[in-house]
Every structure is written in C-alpha cells, then in structure tokens.
Image: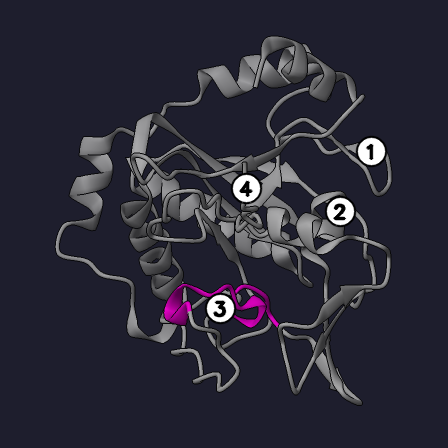
Amino acid sequence: MTPATIERHLQGELTIGLYAINPRTQRSKWIVIDADYAHALNDLIKLQWELKQDGIQAALEKSRRGGHLWIFGATPLLARDCRIYVHNLAARLKMAVKGARLPEGIEVFPRHDALNPGEFGNAIRGPLGTHQADKKRYWFYGADYSLESQIRYLKRLRKLSEDQLSSLVAGMTIPEQFHEPAPAPNPRRGSRGCNEFRILDHIQVQRKSGRNYWTRCPSCALHGHDRSGDNLAIAVDDPRKYRCWAGCTKEMIREALGHPIRRSFVA
C-alpha cells in the first residue's frame, strides 16, 4: 500500500480491498459492521446510536444495498476484542449476525478472532472508493459529498483506544447464539487433516440445486460482481470441486477468501 495506490483508489482508477487482521499481531486498525439487507440502514443507525452511548464515534458509509459502519482505532486493536464487543452489541439490540446459523444479518469485520501465518481473512471495499459494479462512489453521511470534506470529517472522529475497548469487553465472550456450528466431518479429507482447506468452512451456501450448492463467488464479490449471488457452484458429493461460472480461477477465489493456494517449487 503506497500513497500512489491510495490516490488511485480515491480517484476511482482502482478499488482497494482491505484485509482487517495483521496475522503477525492478530490486531486490526478498524472495525466495520456491514449490512446489505432490507431496512439495513435502520439497523446501522441504531448501532451508531448505541456506539455513541458507549463513547464510540462511528462513521456511516452508504453502499449499494445498505451501508458500512466504520470504527477506527487509535492503535491496532485485538481482533478478538473487536468481535466480542460488536457481537455483544448485536445481542443487546437483538440483531441477527450473518453466518451465525443465519443467512442474513449484519457482518462483522474482522471476521476471525485470529489468523494463521499466511492467511488474510476476508476483505472489504476501502472507504471512499468507487464500486466497480456500478462505478459509483458511496459517501459517508455527516459531511458534504466531496473528497476534501469527507476526509476532514473522518479525521475529526474520535478514535477507539485499546484501554477503552478492553474496558468495554471486560468479562465478556461472544454470545452463544452467535457461535458458528462445528463443521461436519468430511470423509474425503486428505492426509493434511484439519489443515486442509475446505471451502464450505468459508462461505454461506445460498441454495442447493441438482448436484451442486450455489452461492456468491468471493472473488466476484470482492470486485463488485455477481449481483445474483449464484456464480459459484460447489459439488455436493465432493466440495473440493468448485467453479465460478463468471470465470474466476481457484487461485482468485482462494485469494479473496484469505487462503491463497501455496505452491511448492522444486529447484
């Protein structure tokens, strides 16, 4: 990430996808609550108000189908503490969290408590970038719709400190209703055991039709494509076989999921 790359992002020449967690520290510089369902903005406004009651200033950004609520850290924050706080906030407001046994609800970034070396987690479109699907820029509420005004607004926001977050989550864990179900045993797993990549651990199946599961392609989604949410087909009898019908390669899909394919080179 260089100033030149950021400038191109702000000018709409490219769109940066941001990964939340630094796997060396398990910390994130920001938290995002993403909502893209019917009446999502109402939920995000409620969340923004509740955050304010906890002394947290959050910036609400428009998106194509809802919005993103951004919280910026004064310093990088432990990903697990970020997730504990937002999940408890969702429980307090009786809001659904997508993926926690539910196909629809808010999504929390960081998406993981911690990552293994070489993993990236899940990416989200960087703020003030142009969405590649419709070539539109989605602005933050609370400032005039110009880059200069928007950046001044973001700079004025009070950042969340590690001490403040630690105080807010003291004694808390992620509520039981938001725990992901344990993955079912896979009789086709390879000799690498639990370290083998399994795509069904990383996506939410939308439907089953014929011999395939169908869902949104992570690579398409990262680039603002797959509006119907069914570009990716995964074989029911062997989930190691999956294909994006828009042409994304397995390498692109794995990269978008934060689990790039490692290649072995023989000298």
Magenta run includes residue 85: no
Task: State the residue position of label 2.
Answer: 64
In the rendered view, does 174 fall on the left or right side of 147? left
> Residue extending furthest front?
267
Give the mark nearer the N terminus: 2 vs 3: 2
Disc 3 to disc 1, C-alpha distance: 28 Å
Q: Amino acid at mark 4?
A: Val
Disc 4 to disc 3, C-alpha distance: 48 Å
Disc 2 to disc 3, C-alpha distance: 20 Å
In the rendered view, does 249 fall on the left or right side of 93? right
Q: Position of residue 63 (x, y in %)?
A: 70, 43
Answer above or below: position of 233 versus 77: below
Task: State the residue position of label 1.
Answer: 136
Q: Which quadrant is the C terminus positioned in?
A: top right
Label 3 Cα crowd, 10 Å radius (few <14 / some 14-19 / many 20+): some
Any mark on residue 266, and which? 4
Q: Position of residue 27 (x, y in %)?
A: 33, 36
Say which of 79 and 72 sits in front. Answer: 79
Asked whether the beta carbons under mark 2 and mark 4 sit within 8 Å of each other, the answer is no
Q: Which quadrant of the structure image shows residue 91?
A: bottom left
Q: Position of residue 223 (x, y in %)?
A: 75, 43
Disc 2 to disc 4, C-alpha distance: 46 Å
Disc 4 versus disc 3: nearer the observer: 4
In the image, the segment drawn in magenta is 192-204
Q: Which quadrant of the structure image shows residue 42?
A: bottom right
Q: Amino acid at mark 1?
A: Lys
Q: Amino acid at mark 3?
A: Ala
Answer above or below: position of 33 versus 8: below
Task: State the residue position of label 3.
Answer: 96
Q: Please, what secondary structure does the residue beneath circle 3 have?
A: loop
**Residue depicted at x 26% and y 28%:** 161
